[in-house]
Image (cartoon, rainbow, N blue to C red):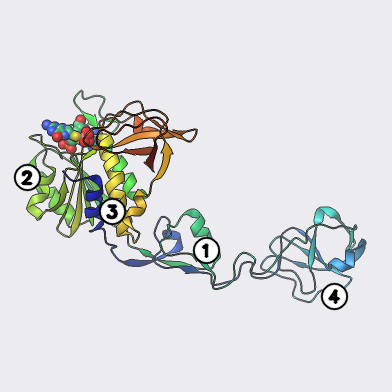
Amino acid sequence: MISFDEASALLAGVAAPLGLETLPLAAAHGRILAGPVVARIDSPRADVSAMDGYAVRAADIAGGAALPVIGRSYPGQPFADDMPPQACVRIFTGAALPAGADRVVIQEEVAEADGIATFGATGGPTFVRPRGSDFVIGRELLAAGTKLTPGALLAIGGGDVGEVRVWRRPRVGLLVTGDELVAPGTAAAHPAAIPDSVSLAVAALAADWGGEVVRIERLADDLPSAVAAAGRMLDEVDVLVVTGGASVGERDHAKAMVAPHGLELLFSKVAMKPGKPVWAGRAGGAIVLGLPGNPTSALVCARLFLAPLLCGMTGRPPAEALAARTLPLAEAVAPVGSRETFFRGHEDGGRVVLADHQDSNGQRVPGSADLLVRLPAGDVANPAGTLVPVLAL
Ligand SMILES: Nc1nc2c(c(=O)[nH]1)N[C@H]1C(S)=C(S)[C@@H](COP(=O)(O)OP(=O)(O)OC[C@H]3O[C@@H](n4cnc5c(N)ncnc54)[C@H](O)[C@@H]3O)O[C@H]1N2
Ligand code: MOO
């Protein structure tokens, strides 16, 4: 059996980006930028008012003043003329300052009657946002490789960029094996049925990491029909994920259903817990990842193998998905034995607490545990306080 690091490296070696596409900004949420985004305009585009009030020359009102209101300036509809001395212009938030004005007095501090605005002797801020004070034309707003979050979309849109070059999303298909599996919400009436929780979680994880889940198919444990289903799906996807059937049971067909389509294995079985039966390979131009059926194992292996794979296929280093931080263990953990172990846990007061149930078939703990805690194989003592690598689950 190979180690987790060896298996990771093998998968990273085939995780090449698929190509680029140009998208309108409105369709680009979650995508990865292929190149930097540069501002096409200054922001603000002019010296503008930060408040609703009156634009003045600061010198005119130094000791208080009563000035004629000679016009109005709105965002998108500025006061067109110069503002002469001893005058003021009604102005609103975001509107350009008239030429000559250098200060805004908020309307709460001004009394206006019959076209005359009366100012007290006020100090304080100018309430002017200078042109380009946020960014200037040509400024790099975002670097290549940035994931387009809501905030990133705000920055790009603000820079007047309407389209972005992004990495193409890998098409992901899921084949879910197990005669016992039924859609969640339909198991209770059938004593032997098990809700298919895994495909939901794996599909969501794939989408979170930049994949486009094009199809999810639940298969009966019947090899000929599974072979046919795998063939159809391999024609459609860049990444085929097979869940379950990874072990040695007589109905465990995961690899056998892909084998007739030219499966070249990268690895099969990894010295890790959970996830020992995880496997990966290539077939029909797609990358195939086989996840164990046990729900916790499936989720942990998806996080540890599918996330880096999708990272690499969307122009980022696969290792980015595995970047860990360290936290001290809240309690001692016994040596884990021959398989490197990824416990589920959560942070509490700067320490990592392991979940109370570490069964690879578990489905409750992943609902709240948000960390994977990596402990080395072997007869290694892990006293409380040991600094251990943790990864967001
Ligand atoms: N003799 C041996 N038996 C097992 C070994 C072994 O080395 N020798 N390995 C064990 C390990 S470790 C794991 S992990 C499991 C993985 O087995 P499979 O990938 O073949 O998983 P299944 O048998 O299909 O299912 C296992 C378990 O998980 C439930 N399951 C499966 N799919 C789903 C799903 N989509 N949603 C919810 N639950 C699912 C299934 O009902 C089973 O209870 O094998 C050990 N056995
Ligand atoms: O390797 Mo398995 O995932 O522990 O049950």
- Bin the neighbour count of mark 2 within 10 Å (Cα to Cα): few under 14, some 14-19, many 20 and up: few
Disc nearer the start of the sequence (4/2)? 4
**How far apart are the two marked residues, 1 and 2, measured between alpha carbons?**
51 Å
- Residue under pointer 1: 157
Q: Say the numbered circle drawn on residue 309.
A: 3
Q: Are marks 2 and 3 in contact (CB under 8 Å)?
A: no
Q: Tell me the SS state at disc 3.
A: helix
- Residue mark closest to the camera, 2 vs 3: 3
**How far apart are the two marked residues, 4 and 3, measured between alpha carbons?**
65 Å
Rendered residue at 31%/40% (across/down): 201
Q: Position of residue 12 (x, y in %)?
A: 26, 56
**How far apart are the two marked residues, 2 and 3, measured between alpha carbons?**
29 Å
* Viewer-side residue, 211 vs 336: 336
* Viewer-side residue, 385 vs 101: 385
Q: Say the numbered circle drawn on residue 380.
A: none
- Residue under pointer 4: 84
Q: Is residue 297 left or right of residue 37?
A: left
Q: Position of residue 99 (x, y in %)?
A: 77, 74
- Residue under pointer 2: 224
Does 13 sit above or below residue 201?
A: below
Disc nearer the start of the sequence (2/3)? 2
Q: Quadrant of residue 272?
A: top left
